[in-house]
Image (tube, rainbow, N blue to C red):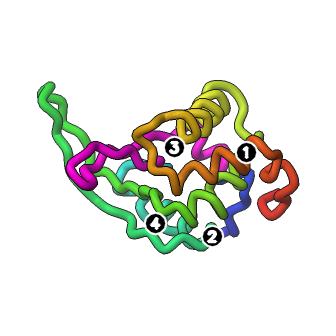
Amino acid sequence: MPELSYDYIRGLIDGEGCFSFCSIPANGKKVLLPAFMLRMAIRDKELIERIRDKLGLKNKVYCYSYQGKDGFKRQPQAVLIVRDLGALRRTIIPLFYKKLIGHKGKQFEAWIERIGNDPLVPESYKIIYRLHKTGFYNSDNRFL
């Protein structure tokens, strides 16, 4: 199989990826953890694993079958979820920073802004926003 390029990964994420938040309970309160997700049909599990490996991520690729409540039959899904601060700060943000076009680029920018401004996001994750505001990610050329 050909090696995956960073441009290929960005293109795939533009259509299949998501920058969102996971709600978890912590100390009796709701906390929002920033999350990067890639979800595809189970037939593409190997591709997701190759992307994970190319990026040096340690996350497991989960498989599940969700049929929904609307009566439609859906294929099982494979999903990679990255919530770890270190992986987000050192890999996910630099890979996509100012490199996504269109709606996904806007979603990415809004995601970083929310990380910095939402009081439900833990203080430790706000380093991502501070690095963004100081221009740190503009000089990261590892994923060209």
Disc 2 element? helix
Disc 1 element? helix
The amino acid sitting under disc 4 is Glu
Q: Main secondary structure of the magenta part?
A: strand
User: Between residues 110 and 61, which one lies in front from this camera angle?
Assistant: 110
Q: Is residue 108 magenta?
A: no
Place residue 79 in its image quadrant.
bottom left
Residue at 29% over, 60% down: 63
Q: Quadrant of the N terminus?
A: bottom right
Q: Is residue 29 magenta?
A: yes
Q: Which mark is residue 17?
A: 3
Q: Closer to the observer: label 2 or label 4? A: 2
Q: Closer to the observer: label 2 or label 1? A: 1
The amino acid sitting under disc 1 is His
Query: Distance of mark 4 from mark 3, alpha carbons?
Result: 16 Å
Contact? badges 2 and 4 (CB < 8 Å): no
Task: Find disc 1 in the rendering and name its residue.
Answer: 132
Q: Give the magenta-colored segment's residue range.
A: 10-34
The amino acid sitting under disc 2 is Lys
Give the crowd class for mark 1: few <14, some 14-19, many >=20 residues within 10 Å. some
Nearest to N terminus: mark 3 or mark 2: 3
Give the crowd class for mark 2: few <14, some 14-19, many >=20 residues within 10 Å. some
Query: Distance of mark 1 from mark 3, alpha carbons?
Result: 21 Å
Task: Find disc 2 in the rendering and name its residue.
Answer: 54
User: Between residues 138 and 65, which one lies in front from this camera angle?
Assistant: 138
Nearest to N terminus: mark 1 or mark 3: 3
Task: Find disc 4 in the rendering and name its residue.
Answer: 46
Contact? badges 4 and 1 (CB < 8 Å): no
